[in-house]
Image: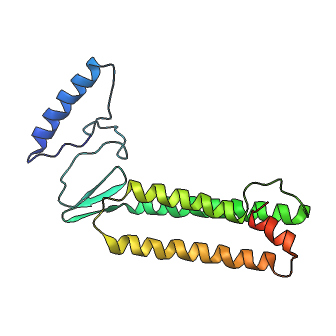
Amino acid sequence: FLRLSGTEGAVAKACEAAKRMLKELGLTCHDPFAKKGNADKAASGHADDGFVFLGYDIRPGLFQPSRQARQKLEKTIDGHLYLGRQAILSVKKAANSFESKHRYAQTLARVDRVVRGWGEAFAYGNAPSTIEDLDLRIDAQLNKFRSWFAAQVSGQDWKTKRRLGGVC
């Protein structure tokens, strides 16, 4: 949860009340005022300079996915593309194998699910240029994967092309 107030004292008081209510329910929360607290889990301070909450970078007039959330998305996509390349190479090496279910079409479908889920989670932002920049970086990742795949199927017979493409 997020508590904003005009004074730090009011926030501290509300935090103590919330901790008491949670304790009655057998629950706990991270204390933003604890000296040994986890700053990634709970923080206190002035909001004028902005803060990150649930993956959003929140600043006066700006509500966008945080840099860390965007980087994590790109890393996840990279991981799926890497696994796709490895699976495609495995099928190509085995010659006439459908053993891998993670080939070209399946890799793109996985990336699509990741991007769609991420987009739904961050659909409430108000920074279209941030999303456009991210889309361009994702397109670069996909274009690199497409080019790599084109090189893998170049000169192959139709059966191999279809197999590597992920179609039975």
> Which residue occupies 61% across, 77% down?
143
> Which residue occupies 84% across, 61% down?
91
Q: Please state which of residues 149 and 137 is positioned toward the viewer in this rendering.
A: 149
Q: Please state which of residues 156 and 141 is positioned toward the viewer in this rendering.
A: 156
Residue 50 in percent (x, y) is at: 24, 59
Residue 147, compared with residue 78, is above or below; it is below
- Residue furthest bottom as drawn: 155
Q: Residue 152 vs residue 141: left or right?
A: right
- Residue furthest right as drawn: 95
Q: Is residue 79 visible?
A: no
> Disc count in the image?
0
Q: Residue 93 vs residue 114: left or right?
A: right
**The quadrant where residue 84 appears:** bottom right
> Which residue occupies 52% across, 64% down?
74
Quick one: quadrant of the N terminus?
top left
Residue 57, compared with residue 144, is above or below; it is above
**The quadrant where residue 28 appears:** top left
Residue 2, compared with residue 83, is above or below; it is above
Quick one: quadrant of the C terminus?
bottom right
Q: Residue 157 vs residue 1: left or right?
A: right
Residue 30 in percent (x, y) is at: 32, 35
**The quadrant where residue 52 appears:** bottom left
Residue 4, compared with residue 49, is above or below; it is above
Residue 120 in percent (x, y) is at: 40, 56
> Which residue occupies 53% across, 57% down?
114
Q: Is residue 80 visible?
A: yes
Residue 124 in percent (x, y) is at: 30, 58
- Residue furthest left as drawn: 6
Q: Please state which of residues 133 and 123 is positioned toward the viewer in this rendering.
A: 123
Q: Residue 82 vs residue 128: left or right?
A: right
